[in-house]
Image: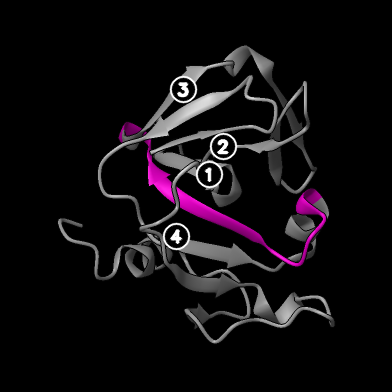
């Protein structure tokens, strides 16, 4: 499964069984997307590969550790590595083919915008579950996971 930024300068590929999606409704994700939530995938490092354009990536980090990587040409948010290096956070909107993806979890529902109406699809968490628990939820029902 391939993905790219808006201008196509940055292209990446995901391999193997791709986990389900989650949506984060926290204030930082709202600001980075300009929307009610950030839909994303947590993928293992060995399943992720840059095809081209990694030199086009700009980075921003807050004092709290929140990171945002984006294309310096078009501004699209881009995948960035997890803090522990075990995988990548991948914005779902960058993916070219999303036919087999399902929404499994909503994070930070407790801090959602007042105008954000969250679908019943997926499990709801007021905050962030621990990483292992979230990864298990996102793999649930996936063959070979």
Q: Which residues are magenta?
A: 32-46
| The one of 113 and 63 positioned closer to us in this rendering | 113
Quadrant assignment, res 13: top left
Badge number at residue 90: 1
User: What is the C-alpha distance between the residues marked 4 and 2?
Assistant: 17 Å
Q: Residues within 10 Å of mark 4 (few under 14, many from 20)?
A: few
> Image quadrant for the N terminus?
top left
- Decide which of tag 1 and tag 3 comes sooner along the chain: 3
Badge number at residue 79: 2
- Decide which of tag 1 and tag 4 comes sooner along the chain: 1
User: What is the C-alpha distance between the residues marked 1 and 4?
Assistant: 15 Å
| Residue 89, position as x, y percentages in the image | 52, 45
| Residue 78, position as x, y percentages in the image | 63, 35
User: What is the C-alpha distance between the residues marked 4 and 3?
Assistant: 24 Å
User: What is the C-alpha distance between the residues marked 2 and 1?
Assistant: 4 Å
User: What is the C-alpha distance between the residues marked 2 and 3?
Assistant: 10 Å
- Decide which of tag 4 and tag 3 comes sooner along the chain: 3
Badge number at residue 50: 3
Q: Left or right: 15 with respect to 125?
A: left
Asked if disc 2 and disc 1 are in contact, CB closer than 8 Å, the reply is yes
User: What is the C-alpha distance between the residues marked 1 and 3?
Assistant: 12 Å
- Decide which of tag 4 and tag 2 comes sooner along the chain: 2
Q: What kind of element bears circle 3?
A: strand
Question: At 65% across and 81% down in the image, what residue appears?
Answer: 118
Question: At 73% across and 57% down in the image, what residue appears?
Answer: 29
Asked if disc 4 and disc 2 are in contact, CB closer than 8 Å, the reply is no
Badge number at residue 131: 4
Q: Residues within 10 Å of mark 2 (few under 14, many from 20)?
A: many
Q: What kind of element bears circle 1?
A: strand
Q: Residues within 10 Å of mark 3 (few under 14, many from 20)?
A: some
Q: What kind of element bears circle 2?
A: loop
């Amino acid at each position: 499964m391939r993905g790219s930024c808006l201008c196509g300068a940055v292209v990446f590929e995901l391999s193997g069984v791709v986990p389900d999606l989650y949506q984060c409704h926290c204030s930082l994700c709202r600001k980075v997307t300009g929307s009610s939530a950030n839909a994303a995938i947590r993928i293992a490092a060995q399943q992720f590969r840059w095809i081209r354009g990694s030199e086009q990536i700009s980075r921003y980090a807050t004092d709290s550790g929140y990171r945002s990587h984006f294309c310096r040409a078009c501004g699209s948010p881009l995948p960035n590595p997890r803090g522990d290096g075990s995988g990548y956070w991948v914005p779902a909107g960058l993916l070219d083919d999303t036919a087999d993806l399902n929404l499994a979890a909503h994070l930070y529902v407790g801090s959602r915008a007042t105008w954000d109406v969250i679908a019943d699809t997926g499990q709801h968490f007021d905050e962030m579950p621990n990483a292992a628990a979230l990864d298990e939820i996102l793999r649930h029902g996936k063959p070979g996971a």
